[in-house]
Image (spheres, rainbow, N blue to C red):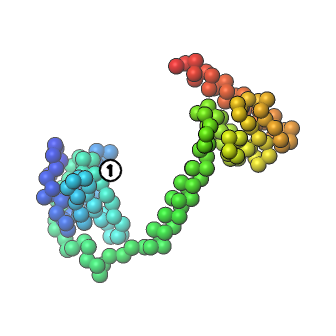
Amino acid sequence: MAMEGSINSEDFTVGCLLSIKTTLGEEFDGQVITFDRPSNILGSKPGPKRNIRFLKANYIKELSFLGQAEDPLDIKKCYIDLHRLQAREELAVRQAEADAERIGVGVTAEAQSIFDALSKTLPVRWDKTSIVVMNEVHVSSPYLPECVSGGTPAANDRVKKVLELERKRLQARGAGL
């Protein structure tokens, strides 16, 4: 059956096997384990692995009924790899913390753009409103080449060069608006 228009929730009876094609071009077979009518979200178990996939039913372009199977939530057959889940959680938390540390608090959008530009080629971190590059060079507000201090002359020159180029890029972008 091809999905055109509204979705009939009876198509998603727990235990039924479906072949699904999404609006994004993905194709997979899965067994329905749940369907939440208010949010229009389908939970399926694709393949023999005990992974669960949630899909907004609006993204289903076509689906075919392949048959009915036994209860997918049979407790004797369910397996959750807690170590894998904990590892994924720890990785996500570390990534979120790293992302949060890269956002300056109390700084302008221009300062954040300069930080982001420096971070593409050099290790940087925020120290309140100052940018610390390579743990030795400090760039203070208003983030001009004259505001660079500390570190070796070579490191200083490198940071100043990147600062100048980023300021030119920001000015060109501002003039193009």
Q: Residues within 10 Å of mark 1 (few under 14, many from 20)?
A: few
Q: Secondary structure at mark 1?
A: loop
Using the image, determine if residue 39 lies above or below residue 46: above
In the image as oriented, which residue stretches furthest toward the bottom? 76
Using the image, determine if residue 4 lies above or below residue 12: above
User: In which quarter of the view is residue 108 placed?
Assistant: top right
Residue 75 placement (x, y as % from top left): 28, 79
* Residue depicted at 36% across the width and 75% down the height: 79
Q: Nearer the viewer, residue 87 or 100?
A: 100
In the image as oriented, which residue stretches furthest toward the front? 106
* Residue depicted at 61% across the width and 31% down the height: 110
User: In which quarter of the view is residue 143 placed?
Assistant: top right
Using the image, determine if residue 133 lies above or below residue 20: above
Residue 135 placement (x, y as % from top left): 76, 48
Q: Nearer the viewer, residue 57 or 175?
A: 175
Q: Amino acid under label 1? A: Glu
* Residue depicted at 22% across the width and 60% down the height: 35
Q: Is residue 1 left or right of residue 84?
A: left
User: In which quarter of the view is residue 49 placed?
Assistant: bottom left
Q: Is residue 153 left or right of residue 91?
A: right
Using the image, determine if residue 167 lies above or below residue 153: above
Q: Nearer the viewer, residue 115 or 13?
A: 115
Residue 117 placement (x, y as % from top left): 65, 37
* Residue depicted at 30% across the width and 65% down the height: 45
Q: Nearer the viewer, residue 85 or 125?
A: 125
Residue 121 seen in render:
no
Q: How many marks?
A: 1
Residue 127 seen in render:
yes
Label 1, on which residue? 26
Residue 61 placement (x, y as % from top left): 23, 46
